[in-house]
Amino acid sequence: MPTSHAPTVLPNEVRFAHVASGARIAWAKSGRGPALVRVAHWMTHVEHDTHSPIWRAWLTGLGRRLQVIRYDERGCGLSGTDAVPLGLDAALEELESVIDATALPRVALLGQSGAAAPAIAYAAKHPDRVSHLVLLGGYLSGLMHTNPAADVAAFHDAKVRLVELGWGRNDPAVQQFFTTTMIPDATPEQVAALNEQQRLSCDGVRAAQIMQARARLDVRELAPLVRCPTLVLHAAGDLVVPIERGRDMAAAIPGARFETLATRNHIPLPGDGGFDRFIEVVADFVAGETSQLALTPRERELAHAVADGLDNLQLAARLGIAEKTARNALSALYAKLNVEGRPQAIVLLRTQGFGGASTATQF
């Protein structure tokens, strides 16, 4: 076995947006390319992501071709909390605040599991802001809208109570209960990482509130209103959300494409049968259809600098060229982009995923 080295820490400059109550919403980004916003799902923590053998692999894999933006929902991770009841409206408000904070005119959305509902709601409400919609292991409506049998409802209530009472204990037994269902084929390292992330994300009261809010989600009336290209993915052996729920969701969204991932893991993991395909198909779906600019490597470097809002002198310094050379290169780039000047170029390039160098990750 090769000598072990500590992994290089991914850049993780955390920023904060705010919702109407004043509560902060922590968000971060990495990678370069068209923007993909990972809608907040179960127990996130934007700082833990970069150290996790689960989410680090996601950020690295997707970040080769996409700028991945992620955030913590209120009451989790580095985000603040308030008295606003959790539910679809609160989740939609958080997503709106983060996308507005990025200042990007359009983004793709990744809604996983319970995050599929707010992703669908945002795409239906803001069709001009969403280029693509990717849904993974999701569902249209929570348990409370499925007419559950008495024993199923009782089991759900028991899990909520278990979380309330046992989440903050020193041993990870309660977190392990959920982890083994979400990632049944995980390595011990991956299991430990998800246990720890759940513990770090929030306390038992908040975790129980999130569970109850997820059970109340319902976007069945909004799904037919989605107009952007949509990709629905679902693990073949998903133990958290049965695959039929994913097929139902794809059928409800006009023109949606459905694909099964060859894994039992609700969260695709490096080493399972679905992870590489997940990374490939999401990157192809978003970057392959969004980025239409045929630029040389040097032109792409220039395009990133323009999208970052640099003036000619700053741009020349970054690229290591004379200011006159920078002006000539800009004129050629504007002609290739068919724009009349810097303001139009910035809007176009940011739409195509350029910019964000201060927090970009070179993979």
Image (cartoon, grey):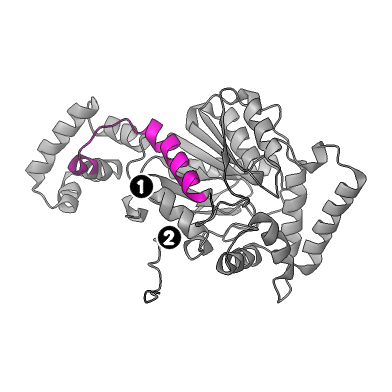
Q: Looking at the image, is mark 1 or mark 2 nearer the viewer? A: 1
Image check: 3 left or right of 248? Answer: left
Vertical placement of residue 309 versus 71, above or below:
above
Q: Which amino acid, mark 1?
A: Arg
Percent x, y for residue 153?
87, 48
**Residue at 54% from the left image edge and 43% from the top image edge:** 97
Secondary structure beneath disc 1? loop
Q: Is residue 279 magenta?
A: yes
Q: How many marks?
A: 2
Mark 1 closeness class: few <14, some 14–19, many ≥20 residues within 10 Å: many
Residue that carries the numbered disc 2 in the rendered image: 12
Amino acid at the residue labelled 2: Asn
Q: Specify few, some or many for label 2: CA neighbours under 10 Å numbering under 14, 14-19, or 20 or more.
A: some
Mark 1 — residue? 32
Residue at 50% in and 56% down: 270
User: On the rendered structure, is 91 left or right of 349?
Assistant: right
Q: Position of residue 10 (x, y in %)?
A: 40, 62
